[in-house]
Image (cartoon, coloured by chain):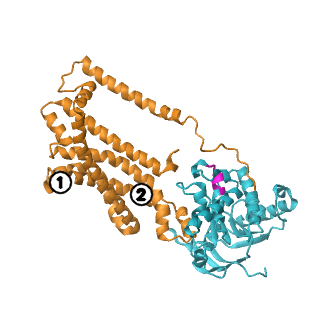
């Protein structure tokens, strides 16, 4: 890529101490991600894909090498509120209504009341939760809660969206619908956030991403980067596109070759 | 994206009153049956008055001088309330200090857990010795010590209850420590706090009455119960016990009502 990357990894390693000696989660990973790209991180469990995402988000520090985000340290990027994060569980605060949950980051960032309410409501409508703004989290289904979490992550229009298996706990039907919804929200956002999407589902990775980064099992390295040359906007029919199948097979074989 | 959701609105609750009655009637029935059984047993075996008066006799004794009994109840309740405010207040403060300085928590919290299991009421005679047996200070102190430890333990647990991802979310917003405390830890601790408070209402009434057994002004429930029972005027003693129950229950109900008002999100749990 000729564009200056928004996220840059330069020989980044992450080593965790453990009872049976140090565990290398990531080993000398170097890669660049362009602004506005949708990246899927995939690999067998324990390959460090979540660690890689967390290093970007300043939730963990590299043991060696450097991570640069918008030419800054991840810590600085975090302080500049560049990150919206969606975890595997929705992490909605039980004591706040759905609307107040979405307002939380805006509240912390000092937006005036009226403005944050309007912003939260427009995002809730965008994710189809307009009628549920005054409900409490436990009154919603898992899929709806995760929608609210996405609305919250987007509320302050961060330039980078970090998603850690956000649909992992949902059933297949809800999951496919939310994938479509995520793509349309992403496409409508201006400017489009760069998305780092951690998943262990091959169809999910291929359906969503511009590029699928396949990580090898421990120690995690970038095994391959697969360009997804399926045109956007992607729709339900995309899953029946022969090119989609070809790419699925490619990712699957890449993952299987590593088991070897 | 237009997601079509067809699950019912969560706010419509037709038949909430019926649900409420459905939840409460077994307890009401049990209570009525229990009182009926008591009345029946006393009548059937013609138990002597000094051994066990019937509920109807207790009620009549109460109704003979309700003003006086309620007023001495108010004295005892006042001590219970003051002690509870001190004990719970200090418990909350100490819990906050423990969260702010984890080293203090490591030293203090295990001891507080142990202290919660100690019958602190046994301190009553000593408190009377130190603070004067007639003065309310000794009763308030007993109640304060009794309620301090459970509140400390419970609120501390509540303040550290937010899971790693809830804290990481705050971290990702670059939230200040103060904001993390006020917008995450405090609301997360509220259910724990009210749990402790409900336990403490009961504890404080017990503490105040029992503390008065070891001395106190004549116009106090514990002293009254002890004196009347001492001269086998059991109806009078029981009527005072009834008053203690009334104050204890009222205290409890008020706490529950406050809890519901403060934590509307907990209502449907």
B182 up-or-down from A34: above or below: above
Q: Residue A47, position in %: x, y?
A: 65, 67
* Label located before the other in sequence (1 or 2): 1
Q: Quadrant of the N terminus of chain A?
A: bottom right
Q: Residue at x 67, y 44 (%)?
A: B7
Q: Which residue is mark 2?
A: B157
Please tell me whether mark 2 sits on a helix, a strand or a loop. helix
What residue range appears in magenta?
A140-147
Separation of marks 1 and 2 at Cα, in angstroms:
29 Å
Question: Main structural element of the magenta stretch: helix, strand or loop?
Answer: helix
A210 up-or-down from B29: above or below: below
Q: Nearer the viewer, mark 1 or mark 2?
A: 1
The numbered mark at residue B127 is 1
User: In the image shown, does A163 or B191 lie closer to the viewer?
Assistant: B191
Q: Does residue B58 appear left or right of residue A128 in this picture? A: left
On whether residue B135 falls in the magenta region, the answer is: no
């Amino acid at each position: 890529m000729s564009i200056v990357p928004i996220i840059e990894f330069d020989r980044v390693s992450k080593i965790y101490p453990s009872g049976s000696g140090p565990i290398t989660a990531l080993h000398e990973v170097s890669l660049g991600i362009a602004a506005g790209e949708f990246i899927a991180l995939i690999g067998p469990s324990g390959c460090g894909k979540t660690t890689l995402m967390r290093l970007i988000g300043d939730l963990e520090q590299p043991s060696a090498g450097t991570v640069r985000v918008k030419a800054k340290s991840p810590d600085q990027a975090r302080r500049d509120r560049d990150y919206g994060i969606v975890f595997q569980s929705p992490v909605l605060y039980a004591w706040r209504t759905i609307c107040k949950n979405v307002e939380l980051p805006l509240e912390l960032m000092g937006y005036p009341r009226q403005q944050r309410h309007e912003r939260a409501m427009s995002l809730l409508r965008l994710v189809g939760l307009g009628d549920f703004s005054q409900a409490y989290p436990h009154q919603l289904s898992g899929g709806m809660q995760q929608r609210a979490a996405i609305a919250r992550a987007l509320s302050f229009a961060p330039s980078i969206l970090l998603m850690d298996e956000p649909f992992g706990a949902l059933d297949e039907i809800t999951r496919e619908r939310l994938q479509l919804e995520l793509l349309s929200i992403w496409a409508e956002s201006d400017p489009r956030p760069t998305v780092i999407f951690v998943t262990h589902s091959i169809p999910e990775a291929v359906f969503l991403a511009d590029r699928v980064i396949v990580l090898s099992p421990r120690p995690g390295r970038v095994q391959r980067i697969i360009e997804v040359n399926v045109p956007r906007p992607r729709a339900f029919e995309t899953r029946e596109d022969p090119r989609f199948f070809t790419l699925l097979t490619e990712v699957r074989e890449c993952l299987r070759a590593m088991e070897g | 994206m237009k997601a079509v959701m067809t699950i019912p609105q969560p706010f419509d609750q037709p038949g909430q009153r019926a649900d409420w009655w459905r939840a409460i009637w077994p307890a009401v029935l049990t209570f009525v049956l229990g009182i009926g059984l008591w009345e029946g047993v006393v009548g059937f075996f013609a138990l002597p008055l000094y051994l066990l008066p019937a509920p109807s006799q207790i009620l009549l004794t109460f109704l003979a001088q309700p003003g006086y009994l309620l007023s001495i109840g108010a004295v005892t309740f006042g001590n219970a309330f003051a002690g509870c405010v001190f004990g719970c207040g200090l418990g909350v403060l100490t819990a906050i200090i423990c969260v702010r300085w984890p080293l203090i928590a490591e030293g203090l919290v295990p001891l507080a857990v142990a202290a919660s299991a100690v019958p602190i009421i046994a301190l009553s005679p000593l408190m009377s010795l130190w603070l004067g047996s007639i003065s309310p200070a000794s009763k308030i102190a007993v109640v304060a010590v009794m309620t301090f430890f459970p509140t400390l333990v419970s609120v501390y647990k509540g303040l550290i209850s937010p899971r790693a991802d809830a804290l990481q979310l705050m971290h990702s917003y670059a939230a200040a420590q103060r904001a993390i405390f006020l917008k995450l830890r405090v609301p997360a601790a509220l259910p724990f706090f009210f749990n402790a408070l409900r336990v403490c209402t009961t504890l404080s009434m017990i503490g105040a009455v029992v503390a008065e057994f070891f001395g106190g002004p004549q116009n106090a429930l514990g002293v009254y119960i002890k004196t009347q029972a001492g001269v086998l005027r059991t109806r009078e003693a029981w009527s005072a016990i009834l008053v203690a129950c009334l104050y204890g229950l009222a205290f409890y109900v008020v706490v529950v009502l406050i809890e519901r008002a403060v934590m509307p999100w907990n209502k449907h749990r």
